[in-house]
Image (cartoon, grey):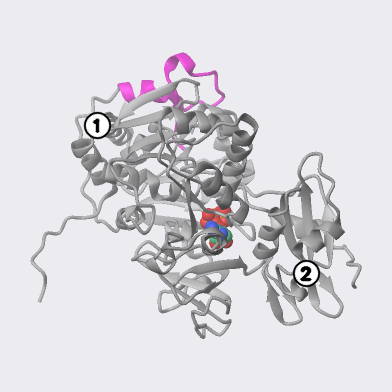
Amino acid sequence: MIGLMQDWPLLCHKILDYAAIQHGGREIVSRSVEGPIVRTTYAQARARALKVAQRLERAGFSEGDRIATMAWNTANHLEAWYGINGIGAVYHTLNPRLFPEQIAWIMNHAEDKALFVDLTFLPLAEKIVPQVPTIRQVVVFTDAAHMPQTSLANAIAYEEWLKEADGDFAWKTLDENAACGMCYTSGTTGDPKGVVYSHRSNVLHALIASTPNAMGISARDVVMPVVPMFHANAWGLAQSAPMVGSKLVMPGGRMDGEAIWELLDGEKVSFTAAVPTVWLMLLQYLEQTGKALPHLKRVVIGGSACPRAMTEKFEKNYDVEVVHAWGMTEMSPLGSLCTMKPDYAGLTGEARLDIAQKQGFAPFGVEMKVTDDDDVEHPWDGRTFGRLKVRGPAVARAYYGGAGADQFDEDGWFDTGDVAHIDPHGYMQITDRAKDVIKSGGEWISTIDLENLAVGHPDVAEAAAIGIAHPKWDERPLLVVVRKEGRQTTKEELLEFFAGKIAKWWMPDDVVFVDQIPHTATGKIQKTTLRDQFRDYRLPTA
Ligand code: ADP
């Protein structure tokens, strides 16, 4: 027997329709690339997105075409995503922090047909676009007055381009399984791999993301996605904020502590999200200036492990709730969030911090398991770690073009490449990336635990643990440390600080101090480069 309910395809542009109808006057505030703060509303954003769609169609673009964007978080970028989706085309976000050759490789792999680009990245586009023969049109997010000279023959200012459309356009009706977005993973090993979101997966992800156990945002919130739209689908906020009618604050290209604080304070932001590096800059700025965060209620921190000291500072000094989250591009990207179930809700102090360090539990729509190398499931005991596998309606079932097929099994489980354990209440904790874990005498040492502990020391700015070859134990940990400016802590002091906090056999065999640690295009520690750098390092214990 078939249900008798309506077939209402889950399409992304319906989210913007809804926002315009029910929350039409709600603001989208952007720090523009030209400088000034620009204010628009959901109703206006929808009107302009319709023009984008109409203009794209007139220029001959159609369903399934990949349209690249290389831009900061602004209302322009947001309306372009919806306009692209409105004709059934696919927004393809490019991370400008990658090397130009890598970006060109990705664009050629995706066969992008057009590019929307911010002024900031026009010089970069001038280098790349000539290497991508499929690109027919470059639209620069600016107006005629700010449009610079460019070597790109097919470039036009966004506002000029939009002028040729009146917005009298109807969205295309599509199959909800049609592709709507594309994002390549950074590819720290091998070539980048393309993840292809569908309208259905993005809509379901936005519904899941906004529930109270997850991000818990509503029409009463002022949401600032600091996480860029070019990193892992902006953690779904470009869909979930309009879906619930939150006011949106788009920080543009400035991520320094002062710029972020100005928007948090001036726009009364209640909810924000980004990687730990951004919050490190903000907390430093607050400490230097004595400023506070009177409006901010919740901050979601993920992308890499949130250090305990960061959670403690936000909660103790600024009365802001930290929600630690884990996810990946392949998961749209949310996989788990550390909000409190009743079992943990009453905890305070150190006991609460112990839980807040975990990456949290999976919301509805994410199935999770931890297995050994032979796919035998580990118990949820909060100790036994292994390969973290997931499945769900917003999890990739393949990469574009069939790359990385060995990460997907016949039962639909996707091997995340992360190593984790799950506790009896369902709280997952990442201990490592599978390729970063240190294998000592057949047992695994978590580099994340060592790093978190190290940055808890008052003199340490950043730390990375890597495995160094050892004749007896196979590998032993080396801790690479960047000291805070003007601080002089020693190896002995650090190891003393570690004593009693971890198992003896986890103690680093050596500590080296460096001026800086290499980072990836998404702000994570680049372990591959670091391992290369220390390839010939001999441990004193070897
Ligand atoms: P990229 O690898 O391109 O930076 P992703 O955002 O897809 O992009 O990276 C996902 C990976 O980031 C995860 O597989 C995991 O290793 C790591 N990660 C994400 N969130 C956390 C977290 N809260 N703690 C530890 N690692 C995390």
Q: Position of residue 447 (x, y in %)?
A: 68, 65
Circle 2 packing at 10 Å, graded few (<14), some (14-19), many (20+), is many
Up/down of 420 relative to 198, above or below: below
Q: Is residue 138 visible?
A: yes
Horizontal arrangement in the rendering, residue 440 relative to residue 6 (left or right): right
Q: Where does residue 100 sit, x and y in percent of width and height?
A: 62, 41
Q: Nearer the viewer, residue 460 or 22?
A: 460
Looking at the image, residue 286 lies above or below residue 534: above
At 77% from the left edge and 74% from the top edge, which residue is drawn? Answer: 504
Label 1, secondary structure: give it. Answer: helix
Amino acid tagged 2: Met
Is residue 128 or residue 348 the one in the foreground? Answer: 348
Q: Which mark is residue 64?
A: none
Residue count near mark 1 (Cα–Cα under 10 Å), binned few <14, some 14–19, many ≥20: many
Q: Is residue 138 magenta?
A: yes
Asked whether, in this view, residue 194 is left or right of residue 245, the answer is: right
Q: In the rendered structure, which disc, 2 or 1, sits on the residue that comes first in sequence? A: 1
Work out which residue is located at the far top of the displayed protein and give it: 145
Query: What amino acid type is highlighted by mark number 1?
Result: Ala
Residue at 76 percent across and 81 percent down: it is 441
Q: Is residue 87 visible?
A: no
Q: CA distance from mark 2 to mark 1?
A: 57 Å
> Is residue 435 inside the magenta stretch?
no
The stretch in magenta equals 135-163
Q: Name the residue located 73 percent from the left edge and 61 percent from the top edge.
A: 465
Query: Residue 248's spot in the image, x, y percent?
Result: 37, 36
Tell me where residue 77 appears, x and y as whole percent.
41, 35
Q: Which residue is mark 1?
A: 43
The quarter of the picture showing ligand 1: bottom right
Vertical comparison of 311 with 148: above or below: below
Residue 507 circle label: 2
- Rendered image quadrant of residue 89: top left
